Image: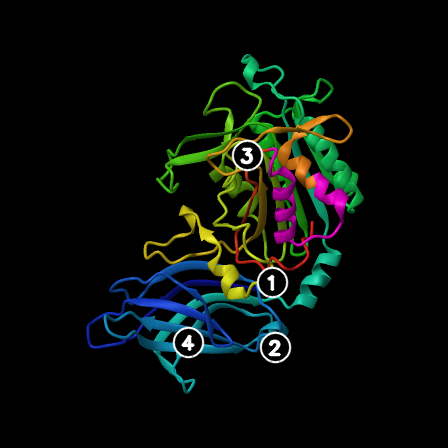
Amino acid sequence: QLYINIREAKDLINGDMGGASDPFVTVKVDGEVRVTTAKLSNEANPQWGHETLISLVGNPAKLEIQVWDEDHFSDDNIGHLIYRFADLANEGGVDGWVDITNKKGKALGDSKINMAIHYYPTEMIKDLRSKGNKRALLVGILYKNHPKADRHLDGCINDTQKMKATLLARGYPEENIRMINDADETPADLQPSRDNIMAGMKWLMEGTKGGDIRFFQFSGHGIQREDDDDGEEEDGMDEAILTMEDGHKTSCITDDEVFGLLVKPLPPVARLVSIMDCCHSGTGMDLPLVWKVDLDPTSSKKKIINAMRGLSKAFEGTGKLTFTAREAILFSGCKDDQTSADAEFADGSQGGALTFAFMEAMDHQKEWTCNLLLRRMKAVLDGSFTQKPQLSTCWAMDLSLPFAF
């Protein structure tokens, strides 16, 4: 993996005779452009704040950071920097202000760029994963004390109990699994109130370091409400999970809040895996990419990236995609405009359809890739359910690699 944060630049020279630069930055890996920042007009001291996580295949050799001045006819190259991946791995990367140079390596006056570059080879990631710890937060709500009878559900606590058994079998210490539900015997501080769930999310992410895996499950009601933030939602609606309290706004946790509590705290090479088995959950964590199920897992990297469609949060004003540099993965029960159904497990107990499909896949075989796992879950539900399970991510991940959780 390659983590890059193109923060800002200062004192850029003019790329042409037209006045101040209209700068943007491209990032090339072995000659292929993998990142393009926003293009800022008439700005010698641009601030991009563009974070990206890139999955790399094989053994890349050269990384090139190019600073450009946009032009109507042909963009002008202001300067560039070249790094060898072997040096980045051995020397710990780059973090701070760096002189922008010409093709001969000569500094271009006072022009500088502020950025962070960290390269994590596959063996380093494996080593960090082997030393990392696992922690899970499992939330299931029956709404049995809700004054509205149509809010009552049957199988949500079953979902979390079955998931707990799966996680224990995969090496999660029991003391690292927190269950929040509205069973009669559940203590007050673990009842699924808004405050308790948000406190659980904070607990889940506390002290997370590279190599750790965090797992979040929500089984209950999902809703949509008008986006009252900054109009960032493409459909004008926020997705949200409904807690045990009554009320439409004060008792829910929005996708923006989930993103801030679970995704933003992730450090490099830490992974968050989430299962949201509820209505309107397709973009329930506001992750910027949704995977298209109908793509072959052996497709080229370029085709994989092109097959992902960006959500509203993923776009700069220029229409260029920006990927949030966090290793977060969400399996959701349906699209944003769909509802999620109940299903019956083999033992006769009730549960959510997404959890049912996930458990069926895990019972079928232990190891999956993300792509094949989603395909299997979709195949399990096809014919009996109208909902379409979704996979969303923060970065253009290699979906042919093993799904680790």
Q: Residue at x 78, y 28 (%)?
A: 347
- Please report contact status of discs 2 and 1: CB closer than 8 Å, yes or no: no
What range of the chain is rendered magenta? 359-384
Count all numbered tags in the image, as a single digit. 4
Query: Is residue 207 visible in the rendered structure shown here?
Result: no
- State whether the magenta stretch is mostly helix, strand or loop: helix
Residue 99: which numbered mark, if any? Answer: 4
Q: Residue furthest bottom?
A: 104
Q: CA distance from mark 2 to mark 1?
A: 27 Å
Task: Measuring from the top left, give residue 180's x and y in whole percent.
Answer: 67, 29
What is the secondary structure assignment of the residue under circle 4? strand
What is the secondary structure assignment of the residue under circle 2? helix
Q: CA distance from mark 1 to mark 3?
A: 27 Å
Task: Measuring from the top left, give residue 6's x and y in whole percent.
Answer: 44, 64
The type of residue carrying mark 1 is Thr
Task: Measuring from the top left, give residue 11's x and y in whole percent.
Answer: 31, 71
Which quadrant of the structure image shows residue 166?
A: top right
Q: Which residue is mark 2?
A: 86
Relative to 380, does residue 190 appear above or below in the rendering? above
Q: Which residue is mark 1?
A: 298
Of the two numbered discs 3 and 4 on the same chain, state the one appearing first in sequence: 4
The crowd level at tag 4 (other Cα within 10 Å; few <14, some 14-19, many 20+) is many
The type of residue carrying mark 3 is Thr
Relative to 375, does residue 35 appear above or below in the rendering? below
